Amino acid sequence: MDGQRRQDIRPGQIVEIVLKQDQRTGKRTRGVVKDILTSAPFHSRGIKVRLQDGQVGRVQAIIG
């Protein structure tokens, strides 16, 4: 799954996100979802989440 639909993302899932500073390179960071920050049901660039380690970015892939 690509992380564009809010209904596909749940706290506790392992995801790959792109941090704001990595948007140009597309470097992905893997982590566990703590909070879902985007309130809209869909976002073309990915739903914004906060990982358990505090990093914030847009979901690019849902791992588990």
Image (cartoon, helix red, strand yellow):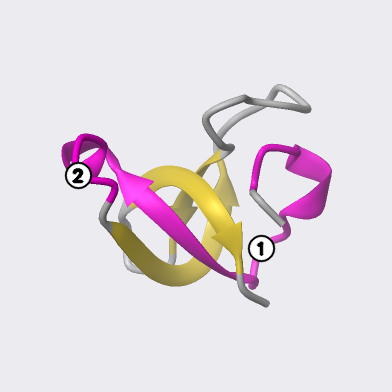
Residue placed furthest toward the right: 7
Pointer 1 local density, CA inside 10 Å: few below 14, some 14–19, many at least 20: some
Instruction: Return the residue nearer the eye: 54 or 20.
Output: 20
Query: Label 2 is placed on what type of residue?
Result: Thr
Percent across and percent down for residue 5 are 75, 38
Mark 1 / mark 2, whichever is N-terminal: 1
- Kindly identify the residue that appears in the image at 64 percent across and 47 percent down: 3
The stretch drawn in magenta includes residue 22: yes
Q: Secondary structure under badge 2?
A: loop
Percent across and percent down for residue 13 are 64, 71
Percent across and percent down for residue 29 are 33, 64
Q: Is residue 41 left or right of residue 14?
A: right
Pointer 2 local density, CA inside 10 Å: few below 14, some 14–19, many at least 20: few
Query: Label 1 is placed on what type of residue?
Result: Pro
Task: Give the numbered dot on residue 25.
Answer: 2
* Comparing labels 1 and 2, the label whose residue is closer to the camera: 2
Q: Is residue 64 left or right of residue 31?
A: right
The stretch drawn in magenta includes residue 14: yes
The boundaries of the magenta stretch are 3-26
Q: Secondary structure under badge 1?
A: loop
Name the residue tied to disc 1. 11
